[in-house]
Each structure stands twice: as structure tokens, then as C-alpha cells.
Image (tube, rainbow, N blue to C red):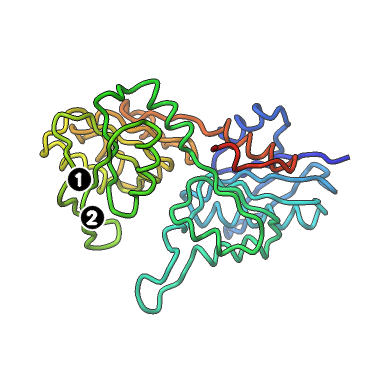
Amino acid sequence: MRRIVLVSGTSNPTLSKKISEFLDVPLVNPQLRRFANGEVYCEIEKNVRGADVFVIQSTCAPVNENLMELLIIIDALKRASANSITAVMPHYGYSRQDRKSAPRTPITAKLVADMLTVAGASRVVTMDLHAGQIQGFFNIPFDNIFASPVLLEYITKNLNRENLICISPDAGGVERVRHFAKKLSTELALIDKRRTGPNVAEAMNVIGDVKGKDCIIIDDMIDTAGTLVQAANALKKNGANRIYAAATHPVFSHPAIVRLAECEALEQVIVTDTIPLSEEGRKVDKIKVISTADILAKAIHRTFNHDSVSSLFI
């Protein structure tokens, strides 16, 4: 008889617990310890022989610690004779390094894919990949789950769509924003962004009419929030009314929280719980967190039952 086992890493225990409650499956917390030199020790205290195991771990900050922890948990499960091991990574670390951006640079997203496969993962489930082509780095089944259903539900219930316009913060995000604009029956506009260095961007021109409109800037992640704040200020200068932002992954590297708190142009920042908020972030009232546990739980359940995952979004 097939059985499902949920294993939680340490990066996002709250999300793991919610997924466990949705599925009504007990959560296994492996014994994870650090040796004096920082090496990770893992022991799975539950029998997983022949089980279909789902390991829930976001590779968020500290990225290298959480990634190594995930690899070690997968290796421990493989050696414990699990039937299958699915790495459920709500946030896929290193996803921005998906190509050679300069000579003699790595493609780290591919390196992570290789490490997960060699460690023993038989499938990977993630949410809103920064670059869709990363799926091609894997020779094992890969599911890229979308957070758009939960974000769209929140926007529909809480924002006035009659005067709303969807904004892409750069040219690369137009396809994502077009999807939101279609579902919300709104127009879209674009920020012409020029990047001058890593994590450094300068928002230039607003392409589209935003005067008197309520704007919602949509992106897959917010890192240092430099792009977002400059985009909001550019929209305000062009006559926008209320300005909101929505993103799947709240990376919030320093000084993102400070920038968001001090940005008067932004009324609300809507994010999901793929990455847990810091204590500092939880104190900022304009940051609203919505849960992806329901949709991730459904994806896990359908994967276990060999049902369609893509039908969740049709």
C-alpha cells in the first residue's frame, strides 16, 4: 500500500505546518544538528522505506545553508530506501543565474539542478520560477506551480478593479503581467528600466497611460526593493492615483524593508509565504502576506495520486 510522508526543512516551518494541515498528513521534522565546524547532520527518525516522500524546503536566506540542508535530507531519505523523493521548493534559490551574463561566469541554476538530481530527488516542485527555461536543466520531472490564483483572488476581493491598471516593472515581466491583466480585465503598462549593476536599477520612462489610475506593480520577487520603489515613484510622477505591488517571493534583502516602509508612493505590498518574513518585515503594516499552502498542498496531493497538476490553473 502506497503511503505519503511529509518532511520539513528548517527554512519555512510555518508553511510546512499549513501544508500538513491541509493534507491531514503528519509532518516529520528530521533531527538536524550542526557540528562545531558548521557541517550539517541529519537523521530521519521515521521509517520511510517504500514511502513517497515530499521534502518542503525553500532555498531562501541563508541560501547556502538551506540548500545544503535540503541536499542532505534528500540523501538521507535515499539511503533510507524511500520509494520516491520530491523536493518541494516554494522558492528556488540561484534562479536568477540561469545563463552566462558575462564571460567566465557560472550558470548556477543548472548547478543546483544537477546537485538535486545527484542527491536523489526524483521530482522537483517549485513556485513561480524566475526564468522558465530552468525547467530544461532537469532530467527528472519538474512542476512549476503558479501563485497567480491566490494573488488574483486577493486582488479581486480587496482592490477596486474598475480603475485598476497592471504594471510590469521591466520588459522581462510583460508576459506575467499580461496574464494578470487578462484575468482582471484591465489594461497594462510598462516601466522602461535600465540596470547599471547587480541589484542596482534606474527606472526611466512609463510606457502607457497611468494618469488618475490605481496601479498594481506585479513581479515574481522583491529583492532589495530598489526597482519597486523607483517604479512606484515614476508612476506617481506620471499622475498615478493609488499604487500597490504584488510579488510571489519576498526575498527582502537589506535594505528592502526600510525602503518599503519609507516609500510614501506605495500603499500596500502583497506577497506570499514562499519565504518567511523577518521580524522586521512583520512590523511593516503595508506588507500583506497571503498563504500558498492550499495550492502547494493540492499540487502535492495530485502528484501523489498521479493526477494532473496543470489542471489547477486551467
Percent position (x, y) of residue 70? 62, 53
Query: Which residue is pictured at 49% across the width and 54% down the height?
Result: 93
Q: Is 293 left or right of 102, judged from the image as shown?
A: right
Kindly check if marks 1 and 2 are in contact, taking CB atoms under 8 A apart as contact: yes
Q: Which sits earlier in the primary sequence, circle 1 or circle 2? A: 2
The type of residue carrying mark 2 is Ala
Query: Which residue is pictured at 54% across the width and 39% down the height?
Result: 12
Percent position (x, y) of residue 24? 71, 27
The residue carrying mark 2 is: 201
The crowding category of the residue bearing disc 2, from other C-alpha atoms within 10 Å (few below 14, some 14 to 19, many at least 20), is: some
Q: Which quadrant of the structure image shows residue 1?
A: top right
Give the residue at the far right of this rendering. 1
Q: Which quadrant of the structure image shows residue 263?
A: top left
Taking depth in this image into account, of 283 and 173 the one nearest to the observer is: 173
Which secondary structure lies at badge 2?
Answer: strand
Q: On screen, 281 above or below 115? A: above
Q: On screen, 11 above or below 153? A: below
Taking depth in this image into account, of 273 and 248 the one nearest to the observer is: 248
Q: Is 280 left or right of 35, judged from the image as shown?
A: left
Query: Which residue is pictured at 18% across the width and 32% down the height?
Result: 264
Percent position (x, y) of residue 255? 28, 45
Percent position (x, y) of residue 274? 50, 40
Which secondary structure lies at badge 1?
Answer: helix
The residue carrying mark 1 is: 230
Give the residue at the far bottom of this rendering. 104
The type of residue carrying mark 1 is Gln
Q: On screen, 20 above or below 218? A: above
Q: Is 39 left or right of 182, judged from the image as shown?
A: right
Taking depth in this image into account, of 75 and 97 the one nearest to the observer is: 97
